[in-house]
Image (cartoon, helix red, strand yellow):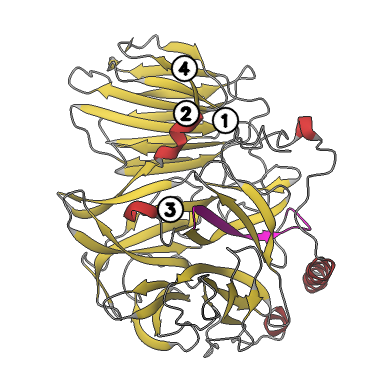
Amino acid sequence: MMQNRVITLFLAGVFLAAAGCTATRPSGQGAAGYYREQHRPQYHFTPESGWMNDPNGLVYYKGEYHLFYQHYPASTVWGPMHWGHAVSTDLVHWEHLPIALYPDSLGYIFSGSVVIDENNTSGFAPPGSGEKALVAVFTYHNMEYERAGRRDRESQGIAYSLDRGRTWTKYAGNPVLPNKGDVDFRDPKVSWHEPSKRWIMPLAVGDYLEIFVSPDLKKWEYASTFGKNEGAHGGVWECPDLFPLRTLEGAEKWILIQNMGRGAVNGGSGTQYFVGSFDGRTFKNDNPPEKVLWLDYGADNYAGVTYFNAPDNRRILIGWMSNWFDYAQSTPTSTWRSSMTIPRDLWLQYTPEGYRVFQKPTPELASLVKNSRRIGGKTIGETGWKMGVPVLHELDLHFDMKTCSATAYGYKLKNSRGEQVVITVDVRQKTVTIDRSGSGKTSFSAEFPKKHSAPVSFTDVFRMRAYADASSLEVFLADGAACMSETFFPNEDFSEIEFFAEGGSVSLTPMSSVNELKSVWNKQK
């Protein structure tokens, strides 16, 4: 039955490609109801309809941020992978574009990256055209090979665009990197390494990484292997990213982001990272091999990668807000499935444990603030404190730890049905926990209604910045030292916040606020 299902889905994908179809407005969604289905995020990116997973090809070119993504337009469950496509001038408001890449005889179009070939190393840009070639590097997944039990089912292909990413031509010489016999051989994240004048390609192979180099994006040479005995290995490694990152003082380290299909800190899919050095061929980890660093401690930030060529040397990351291994195909949405995280700026900071990656919501999100209310000066005791909040909001909470006598404190997002998501700061254990077990619809997966915790450290003021949408919460702890991303599906939108304290009290400093946010979709046709 499964094999027949796969064949049917593949034929559907071929039909869509042949017909030239693109993502369309969900059935019954007129202008007044556009992007208004239950649980539909209002300032996170979601496809108009159909299935979406990994962000792909993040690139900034001529004033536009491109977001490609794994997409199956014919269903809300995974099927033959296409590359969906959207663009934005501000990382907040997105314009949907036609599907960029369709499956073909070499296979489905799995994850990958897009680069700007500034020096025309590929030769794809005609001389004198004045246009740079955008080159997509992606994984082909051959389902016929998989059904036949062949190990060489995945290979790497390329395509190019000469019109700002609007149309794409696949290279006639694909695949540019054939498979040598690895079942998992995917997700190229290509970038230019200026000192060696070469393109570099970290590639996920089973539960470790291989790095390849190329002068022209067409001919690739194996350079090195990393990770066979380093980091976490609870599942296959996927969607790597390798890039330099600086501290505010100018110190530089190389960061290797390595997503992992299962066995992450939250129990399912997740993202680890390594800090080290890179010489153009080999990555070396600064930390002990057994040390595992997590980019996010929540359950719903996977396959995250960063932008190529982001302005002002920014390093901007977007992740897929779901959990592939535990429940991605079962979440209770209707015409679409899954969303992306908000964009996040990354930077490097030195800590007593060594260099670590810090994150903050991209500053462009400030343009969505509709109303702002200061809530500082409140002292929260064991009787608690409640206030109404808009569905779409940002909480910027500064807790005064100099006067804190509580053993634990936090807040609950609630609705009139008694459904809630609970965020608890445990002062003694030095953790922050998100509990979504009573958040509403949870029966679609036994793994969903659980608690997830992140370690934190306290200074005189503990800052917690949180972004809540219709079905998600992203929490940035201790000025970005740790992050937690969680989805939820209440039967009624959360409209109240209840602060609480246990064993004493805690005060909010005058800097604390709650900001109402605008929808980014309400002006769409």
The C terminus is located in which quarter? top right
- The amino acid type of the residue labelled 3 equals Leu
The alpha-carbon separation of the residues under discs 4 and 2 comes to 9 Å
- Please tell me whether mark 1 or mark 4 is closer to you in this view: 4
Q: Tell me, yes or no, whether the highlighted magenta stretch contains residue 228.
A: no
Label 1: which residue? Answer: 438
Q: Earlier in the sequence, mark 4 or mark 3?
A: 3
Apparent side of residue 506 relative to residue 191 in the rendered image (left or right): left
Amino acid tagged 1: Gly
Q: Is residue 74 magenta?
A: yes
Structural distance between the alpha carbons of marks 1 and 4: 15 Å
Determine which residue is flagged by label 2.
Answer: 422
Q: Is the residue under label 3 in contact with that under label 1 (CB below 8 Å)? A: no
Residues at marks 4 and 3 touching, judged by CB atoms closer than 8 Å = no
Residue beneath the point at 84% across and 43% down: 27
Residues rendered magenta in the picture = 62-76
Hey, which residue is sitting farthest front in the picture?
Answer: 128
Residue 412, given in percent of the width and then of the height, sits at 48, 23
Q: Which residue is mark 4?
A: 498
